[in-house]
Image (spheres, helix red, strand yellow):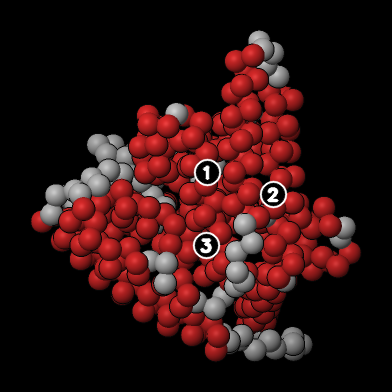
Amino acid sequence: MHHHQYPWPKLPPSVLTELKYSVIVSFVLIAGICYVRLASLHMPPGFRRFIALLPVISLLPILPAAFSFIHLRTIAAIFLSWLALLKLLLLSIGKGPLDPSQSFLPFLFTATLPVKFRQGHRKSSPISISEVLVLSLKTLVLICNIYLYRYHPLYDMYTLLSLYTCHLYLGLELAMTLTGITASIILNMPIEPQFNDPFLATSLRDFWSRRWNIMLSQTLRQLVYDPVAPRLGPAIGLITSFLVSGLMHEVIFYYLASTRPTGEVMSFFLLQGLGIIVEHIVKRATTWRPHKIIACPMTIGFVMISAFWLVFDPLLRTGADERVVAECMGVITFCEDVVHAVLGKIRN
């Protein structure tokens, strides 16, 4: 009995082109970080160090433009044009997670990846069994979420936006977590988590300060809030931090949608900052504290509804969401072709 033969799928030329540019960007980035470490070792923090690092700081926002795939371009923009850029700015003034006296690999990984190593700690395994199970479950949910895109013409707007929200959260968390685990395995050094169950946040301050993208929160505190708050007050420091975050997100959305910023994404982050201030005023004026069963849905609901309005709407208008879905479907189809080819070989 003969079974149907499935040919081995070939990588499209566009994928090979992206791989080529990934190698080129990696070499350029490594060379730039080598220079950054060397310059920082020989210059004290301050204006001269900033000027010395400026060529690499200026290069970071350009590198993501090398990629044409939205997923790769967006991840590169988050890692390089956002986190790495802020870390180098902090390094220029002698703050932040980067230390030029570190050995090269920890310095390189800390500079270019969303990782922060825990100094002075070692553990036998970089990831526990329970963490593996949680990551596997989140990966499965993300895969199911992507599969559901096949029926996206059938969904109403809010169902589709909920799927996009799940995709954004799980995709970002898994990308950062798996990157961190890889760095931890290579260097045998534990890392600090970047997400802390944001869906369990009981307030906007809890969500943005302690649960969502923790490294960015810490970096913005050192770079923006700490210098501004003592001079102009905590409220201005907070709003300024969210303003800077909004501007950086506008850059990320430029890479994602390839259109001029509209200010809506920045408005989203300013709204979150104002929400935190209102929370603080209410807590000082009253003794009422909602139970977490109520506080969690209120917090996540506020974030999601304001994101539907100010974050996803620009993506829908430009059709960026359709391109994201098309890329996901391309990956799913390629994986299915590989599975069919393997099963065909086994049966024969």
Question: Which residue matches tag 2?
Answer: 307
Three-letter code, disc 2: Ala
User: Can you say whether 163 is above or below 72 in the image?
Assistant: above
Q: Position of residue 267 (x, y in %)?
A: 63, 49
Q: CA distance from mark 1 to mark 2?
A: 15 Å
Residue 109 numbered tag: none
Q: Position of residue 115 (x, y in %)?
A: 38, 50
Q: Position of residue 337 (x, y in %)?
A: 67, 79
Three-letter code, disc 3: Val
- Disc 1 is placed on an element classified as helix
Q: Nearer the viewer, mark 3 or mark 2?
A: 3
Residue 251 numbered tag: 3
Question: Which residue matches tag 1?
Answer: 242
Q: Between disc 3 and disc 1, whose residue precedes?
A: 1
Q: Is residue 138 visible?
A: no
Q: Contact, CB < 8 Å: mark 1 with mark 2?
A: no
User: Can you say whether 346 is above or below 246 in the image?
Assistant: below
Q: Please give the name of the residue rendered at 64% of the width and 14% of the height, measured from the top-left corner.
A: 285
Q: Please give the name of the residue rendered at 32% of the width and 63% of the height, measured from the top-left corner.
A: 57
Q: Between disc 1 and disc 2, whose residue precedes?
A: 1
- Disc 2 is placed on an element classified as helix
Q: Please give the name of the residue rendered at 69% of the width and 30% of the height, measured from the top-left corner.
A: 296
